[in-house]
């Protein structure tokens, strides 16, 4: 039992070092052309080290918020502002998705074309399937913000 408690406190202590090392050496994990750097992100994204970095940041923010109440209210206002921005961005993505879907249907069914061409001189030409694949991105944005925005609004209404 004491070993488990010691292990937890050691990992909380090492979280400060791990965070400082990751922030001071961004080239070791942000170089997407290097397969080793990609594996670092994949490994550390689900590792014990990353968990304890996030957990320690949570503990520090909670402790500072208990000590200085204004700081925590600033965090809440910042997170709610971010939630509103993400929700508005996703709403525009939804509008773009609907317009793009209408355009795809018109081009495929009415004009019977397999591609869209834009431009004067040297045109930009993509197959319709390229635009259909982009709709997956818009659907992901809408689904995640559809889950995110009501939860943030529920917190603003006092439903905790």
Image: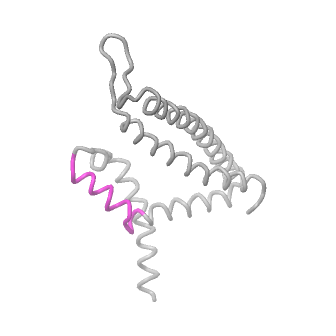
Quadrant in which the C terminus appears: bottom right
Number of marks in picture: 0
Looking at the image, which is closer to me, 118 or 55?
118
As for residue 42 lying within the magenta part, the answer is yes
Q: Residue at x 32, y 10 (%)?
A: 121
Residue 70's place in the image compared with 134, above or below, is below
Q: Which residues make up the magenta segment?
A: 34-50
Q: Give the residue furthest to the top.
A: 121
Say above or below: 17 vs 9: above
Residue drawn 69% across the image and 54% down it: 68
Q: Nearer the viewer, residue 66 or 138?
A: 138
Residue at the image point whose x is 38% and y is 26% from the top: 116
Q: Position of residue 141 (x, y in %)?
A: 52, 45
The percent position of residue 24, horizontal first and vertical second, equals 35, 47
Please tell me whether the stretch drawn in magenta is mainly helix, strand or loop.
helix
In the displayed image of the protein, which residue is found farthest to the bottom? 1
Quadrant showing the N terminus: bottom left
The quadrant holding residue 151 is bottom right
Looking at the image, which residue is at 41% across and 62% down? 50
On the image, the x and y values in percent for residue 142 come to 56, 46
Q: Residue 25: x, y in percent?
A: 31, 48
Above-or-below relation of 17 to 138: below
Magenta span contains residue 118: no
């Amino acid at each position: 039992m004491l070993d488990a408690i010691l292990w937890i406190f050691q990992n909380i202590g090492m979280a400060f070092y791990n965070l400082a090392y990751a922030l001071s050496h961004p080239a070791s994990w942000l170089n997407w052309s290097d397969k080793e750097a990609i594996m670092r992100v994949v490994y550390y994204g689900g590792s014990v080290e990353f968990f304890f970095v996030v957990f320690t940041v949570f503990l520090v923010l909670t402790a500072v918020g208990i000590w200085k109440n204004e700081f925590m209210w600033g965090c809440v206002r910042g997170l709610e502002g971010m939630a509103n921005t993400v929700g508005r961005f996703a709403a525009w993505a939804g509008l773009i998705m609907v317009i793009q879907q209408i355009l795809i249907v018109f081009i495929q069914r009415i004009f019977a074309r397999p591609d869209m061409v834009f431009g004067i001189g040297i045109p930009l030409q993509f197959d319709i399937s390229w635009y259909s694949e982009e709709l997956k991105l818009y659907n992901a944005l809408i689904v995640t913000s559809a889950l995110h925005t009501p939860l943030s609004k529920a917190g603003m209404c006092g439903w905790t």
